Image: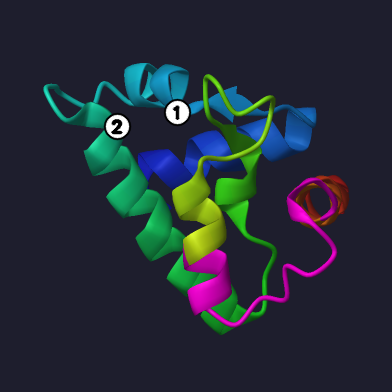
Amino acid sequence: MNELEARLAELAALQQTITYGQLARDLAIPGPGAIAKLTQALERLMETDAAAGMPLRAALCSGRLAQGLPAAGFFEKAASLGYDLSIGPEAFVQQQRQSLWRRAQI
């Protein structure tokens, strides 16, 4: 498990979310472009999660101005991976987060 996965596992166990900026700082991702590097890693992780039939760990991230939701790229990537977003972004993210939190308690 790499640092990103370990940090997301910790957040899931604590039933917490994190902003992209804080996660980039926690992981000491160098800038400029730290957020872009982080989102690339999160998108690769989304591919891994989708292939394994697991909840999307990237759902634990939120955009600074996204009212507690992930950034638009999260939803674009989820749709490209075949996820049904017709329930709406808030419900989709909550569904993913609840699944992650439940799995972390097992």
Graded by Cα atoms within 10 Å as few (under 14), some (14 to 19) or many (20 or more), the crowding at tag 1 reads many
Residue placed most toward the observer, 85 or 57? 85
Say which quarter of the image contains residue 86. bottom right
- The kind of secondary structure element at disc 1 is helix
Mark linked to residue 20: 1
Q: Is residue 78 magenta?
A: yes
Taking 69 as reference, is 41 left or right? Answer: left
Residue displayed at 35% across by 25% down: 24
Residue displayed at 40% across by 20% down: 21
- The kind of secondary structure element at disc 2 is helix
Residue placed most toward the observer, 39 or 51? 39
Q: Which residue is mark 2?
A: 35
Q: Earlier in the sequence, mark 2 or mark 1?
A: 1
Residue displayed at 41% across by 41% down: 4
> What segment carries the magenta color?
77-91
Graded by Cα atoms within 10 Å as few (under 14), some (14 to 19) or many (20 or more), the crowding at tag 2 reads some
Asked if 51 appears above or below 57 in the picture, the reply is below
Residue displayed at 55% across by 49% down: 58
Report if the CB atoms under discs 2 and 1 are less than 8 Å apart.
Answer: yes
